[in-house]
Image (cartoon, rainbow, N blue to C red):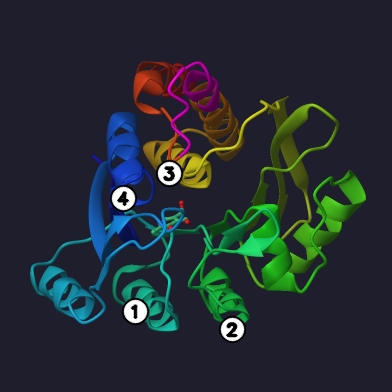
């Protein structure tokens, strides 16, 4: 069985980061190890969340793994939060990644044109160092703009997305995947470019009239899991887009309007079906 290490926070309530990565990657059939950066009561869309920083514990954890001969097929980095966590993630890559280890980075730092609470623009610059070491990066448009110094646009057309990809390719040697990228009204999906060849590939699904927290984590976890499981890159990203859209639809259909997170759980059977079908 393949094994992914994911580096991101544990948000105890709110469905994001590790509480999405663990169930989703496991459901895909890939073992998931976690290196938690911090323990939060909720994600930062709730006001006044508590936070226990685990920055001092992280090097002790990874050293124990190294001493125990533990290895990983891939490393998936999500929400970190501090420049020090970025340095720790870089040293984990140094310690555990060889030529066969895929490194995925979701440079989580903002959405809807704004940084999340607790991030500053210096973080975006530091994140570029992580993207440089990654085989695939999966920013949303806000994050792509922050990392490339591009003006954020709510409605995007192909020339804008292509320009963003070209600029991202200067800081990532692998594949850059912009998520939440709309190519026509009423649609959304991903727009991607391979750094080496400049080849573009993309996929659009219906844009649903709702936006929920954690959908970026859902997309990145699914894409990383499916690729490591052995599904082609294009199909893995399509499955990630479809599973995310399905989960958003499921959430919208819930009369309680759970704004804090997305109902990915009830769509796990559909996810497994898509992955198994792609493998056969
Ligand atoms: O979904 C990204 C994310 C992860 N972890 C924490 C967050 C956020 C987004 O705000 O606050 C703690």
Residue 100 picture location, percent across and down: 40, 59
Q: Is residue 83 visible?
A: yes
Q: Are marks 2 and 3 in contact (CB under 8 Å)?
A: no
Q: Are marks 2 and 1 in contact (CB under 8 Å)?
A: no
Q: Which residue is nearer to you in this view: 95 or 280?
A: 95
How far apart in space, not on screen, are marks 2 and 3 (Cα)?
A: 26 Å
Q: Residues within 10 Å of mark 1 (few under 14, many from 20)?
A: many
The magenta stretch is 248-259
Quadrant for the C terminus, please: top left
How far apart in space, not on screen, are marks 4 and 2 (Cα)?
A: 25 Å
Q: Residue at x 60, y 37 (%)?
A: 211
Q: Which residue is nearer to you in this view: 260 or 250?
A: 260
- State ligand 1's quadrant: bottom left
Residue 124 picture location, percent across and down: 60, 75
Mark in front: 2 vs 3: 2
Q: Secondary structure at mark 3?
A: helix
Q: Residue at x 14, y 78 (%)?
A: 60
- Compared with residue 81, is residue 267 higher up or lower down, i.e. above or below? above
Q: Earlier in the sequence, mark 2 or mark 3?
A: 2
Quadrant for the N terminus, please: top left
Q: Which mark is residue 221?
A: 3
Q: Is residue 125 left or right of residue 78?
A: right
Q: Which residue is mark 1?
A: 88
Q: Residue at x 88, y 45 (%)?
A: 158
């Amino acid at each position: 069985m393949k094994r992914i290490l994911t580096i991101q926070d544990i948000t105890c309530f709110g469905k994001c980061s590790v509480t999405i990565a663990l169930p989703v990657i496991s459901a895909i059939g890939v073992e998931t190890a976690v290196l938690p950066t911090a323990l939060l009561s909720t994600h930062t869309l709730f006001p006044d969340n508590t936070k226990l920083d685990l920055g001092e514990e992280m090097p002790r954890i990874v050293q124990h793994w190294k001493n125990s001969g533990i290895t990983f097929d891939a490393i998936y980095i999500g929400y970190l939060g501090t420049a020090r966590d970025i340095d720790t993630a870089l040293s984990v890559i140094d310690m555990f990644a060889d030529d066969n280890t895929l490194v995925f980075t979701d440079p989580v730092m903002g959405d809807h044109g704004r940084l999340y609470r607790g991030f500053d623009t210096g973080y975006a610059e530091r994140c570029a160092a992580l993207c440089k070491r990654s085989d695939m990066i999966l920013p949303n448009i806000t994050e792509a703009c922050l990392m490339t110094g591009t003006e954020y646009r709510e409605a995007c057309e192909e020339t804008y997305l292509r320009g963003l990809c070209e600029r991202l390719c200067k800081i990532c040697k692998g594949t850059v995947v912009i998520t939440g990228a709309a190519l026509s009204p009423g649609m959304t999906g991903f727009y991607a470019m391979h750094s080496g060849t400049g080849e573009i590939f993309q996929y659009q699904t219906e844009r649903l009239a709702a936006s929920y927290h954690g959908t970026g984590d859902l997309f990145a976890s699914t894409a990383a899991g499916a690729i490591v499981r052995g599904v082609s890159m294009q199909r893995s990203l399509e499955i990630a887009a479809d599973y995310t859209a399905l989960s958003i639809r499921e959430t919208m259909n819930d009369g309680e309007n759970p704004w804090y997170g997305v109902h990915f759980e009830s769509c796990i059977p559909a996810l497994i079906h898509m992955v198994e079908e792609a493998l056969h």
